[in-house]
Structure formats: C-alpha cells, structure tokens
Image: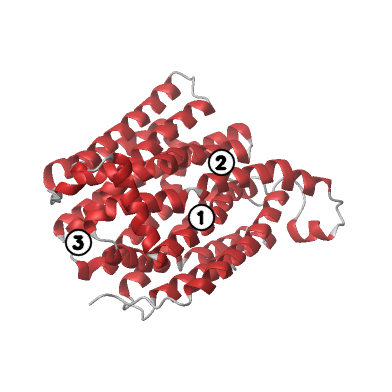
Amino acid sequence: MKKYILLWSTQSLSTLGSGMTSYALVLWLYLQSGSALKTALLSVCSYAPYIIMSIFAGALSDRWDKKRTMLFCDLMAALSTIVVIILIKTDVLVPWHLYLINAFNGLMNTIQQPAGEVTATLLIPKEYYQKTSGLRSMSNSLNSILTPIFATALFAFAGMEGVIAVDLITFAIAFFTLLILIPIPKQTSEKKTEESLMRSAAVGLRWLFEHRLILLLILFLAGINLVASAYEAALPAMVLSKPMGGETVLGMINTCVGIATLCGSLLATLLPAPKNRVRVICLTLFFSMSTENFMLAFGRNPLTWCIAAVLGWILIPVMNVNMDVIFRSTIPPELQGRVYSCRNTMQFFTIPLGYLLGGVLIDEVCEPFMSAVLADHPLTRLFGTGKGAGAALMFFLLGIAGIVVCLAFTIPLKKFDWRDPD
C-alpha cells in the first residue's frame, strides 16, 4: 500500500493546486461578466472533450504505458496553466482564452483518467478497495474545504499570479514523485494490442450492455449529474447576487461542502461493508436530492445555505464508495480502461448539458420571470426579489427533478441485491 499512498497523496496535492486556479478563474469571470451562462461555459468546455473522446481514451489507455500517459497529461496541464499566467501578465486574458484552455485540459483529463483508474486497481489489494475509495473521497473533501479558503486568500493578497504559482509547485511535487518513486505494474495482454481502436472501444460498450446492473447505475448517475451540474451553474449566480451573499459567503458554502464530504468520507472508510450496496446508493442519492436544493431555494441567509450544503453532500462519499467497490469488483482489470471510458461518456455527457441548461434557464427564463413578478406575489415570498431570485426558483425546480430521477431508477434497481465477492 505504500506506493499507492504516496501516489494518492501527491496527486491529491496537485489536484488542490489545480482546483485553486479553477476556482479563482470562475470568480474572475463571473465578476467580469455577471453572467451565469458565460461562467458555466468554463465547465462545458472542460467536459465537452471528455464526453466526446472518453470512449476512445480507454482503448488507448489499455494499450499505452500507464505511467507515461499520466506524466504526459500532467505536463500538458501545467503548460496550459503557464499560458494563463502569460496572458494575465500581458493583460490580454479574455473569456474565450479560458474556454480554449479548459477544453485542452479536459482532453488531457480524458486521457489520464482511465490510466489513473487502472493504476489504482493494479496497486491496491482487493481487500482494501473500500478503504482506499474512502481515502480518495476524503482527499477530494479536503480539497473542497481548502480550495475556496486558499484560493480566496491568495487571490486577495497575491492575485492570480500567486494562485497559479502554488498550482505549479504542487504539480512539480506530484510529477517528480510519480516519475522517480512509483513503479506501476505492467499488464500483459497480446490481444488488446492487435485490436483496432474502434474494436477496442466496442469491447467496453459490449461489456456494459451485457451487465445490466452496471449499465443502470451509470444511467442513474447520468441523470443525477444533469441535476448536479445545473446546481453548480445556479449556485454562484444566486449567492454572488443576493444581498446577504458575496464571494466570502460562496467560499463558506463550498467549505461546508468540503467539510460535509470529509465527514462522509471518514464515515465511508470506517463503516463495515453493507449487505446491499445498491440500496445504499439509492437511499443516499434520494436524501441528497430531496434536501439541499429545496433549502437553497427557500433559504434567505448564509446559515441556511451552509446547512443545506452539509445535508446535500454528507452522504455522497458513502454513495461513491459503494459505487466504486461494485465497479472495481465486477469489471475485469484488463478491461477497466475501456469500460471506465465508456462509463465516462455515458455517465458524464449530461454534465455539460446541465451547465448549459442551468445557465440558459437562469439568464433567459428564471431571472427575467422573477424580475417581472410583482413584489406582493406569492413567488416573491418564496424566492425573494431582485437578482438571484431566479436562481432560487431554479433550485426549486432542480429539487423536483432530482426526486423524479431517483424514483425513476430506484424501482428497476430494487431487484438487484449485489453482494461483495468472496
């Protein structure tokens, strides 16, 4: 486990640096434009290549050397960060620069992600799958806590230059640790090297359609991701616009998300294996979807918003851990690159759609609608007045949508009683 722990810790540190840069750039763009749609396009551009190319990236990942693939993608992402700092220093940075850079980084992540998934499987003994999945969730949670705090502080005192400098330092630590200290076991499979790229991708799709439980779980998460990405588009639009909101309050909410997921990660790591992991996945997602969005819709102050964030996210790591164990235990290691990439395309294609839908509905439908509502109308008593009221209405609609998605998939999933293999 020592090699995996070293890889996990340094890669998590690098992820923190990258997250700080992304967070600071979202703040910069929303404060510059005041548009939820323009800000959401940052995430759309990140995910678009991920969705389009993922199905082929897994086939390539199963062929290529995992270590070299991860190192190359990390290096390209660092170079794109250097481009950002050059554009800032020359005072020519505009939104379309960020869209192109995010698209490039999304492509690198598309190639790296399946290589990283297979690497984790090769380094982790099977009996540690649940605990290491909890560790990954814990590091993601810590990053969620620290990213808004560190990014906001650095942005205030050192500007984007300071944020990007920390990003590059964390990249260097992770890059050279992987390069020098972590050997990755090689897989030997002659058949996959003889397959064409299209045939290799088809193998992953065929496996998924032959295993209905995995396919249903992927489609379930696709529906949840549609709602969650629209939530991500709506949150800054509401919090940065409300009288009791602002950058600090947005940072507080994101920190509460991180604290909640950290507690959930510790819970997932310590809990014994449940009797029915599918049931746990359904119940945790239903709880999340039926609490946070409604509290954000009706809440009028930072305390309510922070409580909503805690309730909405505290059980998500438990869901992720159970999902991860099912996937790693069911999918053969020699097929994981291809199957995970097909999963990425099917599960994550709704994320850019959700960001676009959220941005368009807020800017073009919900905000204009709420601005036209009379001050004494029942809707204003529910969602408030002024800029941000439309985003609050959007959260109400997302709460309803999340419950519908959960009920639609829980019914067919009830017949599956998945048990851990011996």
What residue is disc 2 on?
Answer: 40
User: Which structural element holds mark 2?
Assistant: helix
What residue is disc 3 on?
Answer: 124
Residue 70 position (above or below residue 265): above
Residue 306 image offset from top left, x and y in percent? 56, 61
Residue 407 position (above or below residue 272): above
Pick whichever of labels 1 and 2 is earlier in the sequence: 2
Query: Residues under labels 2 and 3: Cα distance?
Result: 36 Å
User: Which structural element holds mark 1?
Assistant: helix
Q: Count the marks: how many?
A: 3
Give the camera-side residue of 62 and 269: 62
Query: Residues under labels 1 and 3: Cα distance?
Result: 28 Å
Pick whichever of labels 1 and 3 is earlier in the sequence: 3
Q: Amino acid at mark 1?
A: Asn
Give the camera-side residue of 319 and 98: 319
Query: Residues under labels 1 and 2: Cα distance?
Result: 14 Å
**Foreground mark, 1 or 2?**
1
Pick whichever of labels 2 and 3 is earlier in the sequence: 2
Q: Amino acid at mark 3?
A: Ile
Category of crowding for the residue at label 1, using alpha-carbon neighbours closer than 10 angstroms: few (below 14), some (14–19), many (at least 20):
many
Q: Amino acid at mark 2?
A: Ala
What residue is disc 1 on?
Answer: 225
Residue 340 image offset from top left, x and y in percent? 34, 53
